[in-house]
Amino acid sequence: MGQWISWVPEVGFPILVTFYLLHRIEKRLEELNDSILKLPEQIN
């Protein structure tokens, strides 16, 4: 049981940080995608 308790912070924290960063980047990726899709309209 003690091994599991020491394992959770080592693995859980990086997973939490990864999900937080992915959530923040997701909005920016959607904006970038929208901008790329609008490029043909702006070129013509």
Image: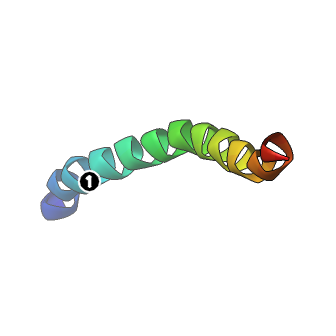
Percent position of residue 28, x then y: 59, 38
Please, which residue is most extreme toward the front here?
A: 44
The residue closer to the viewer here, 12 or 18, is: 18
**Residue in the picture at 49% in, 47% down:** 22
Percent position of residue 43, x then y: 78, 45
Percent position of residue 5, x then y: 21, 53
**Residue in the picture at 79% in, 52% down:** 40
The residue closer to the viewer here, 2 or 39, is: 39
Amino acid at pointer 1 = Val
The residue closer to the viewer here, 29 or 41, is: 41
**Residue in the picture at 64% in, 38% down:** 27
Count of numbered circles in the view: 1
Above-or-below relation of 9 to 7: above
Q: Quadrant of the N terminus?
A: bottom left
The residue closer to the viewer here, 2 or 15, is: 15
Q: How is the image coloured?
A: rainbow
Mark 1 crowd level (few <14, some 14–19, many ≥20, 10 Å Cα): few
Q: Is residue 31 left or right of residue 18?
A: right
Q: Which residue is mark 1?
A: 8
SS at badge 1: helix
Percent position of residue 3, x then y: 13, 62
Q: Is residue 20 left or right of residue 40?
A: left
Q: Quadrant of residue 26?
A: top right
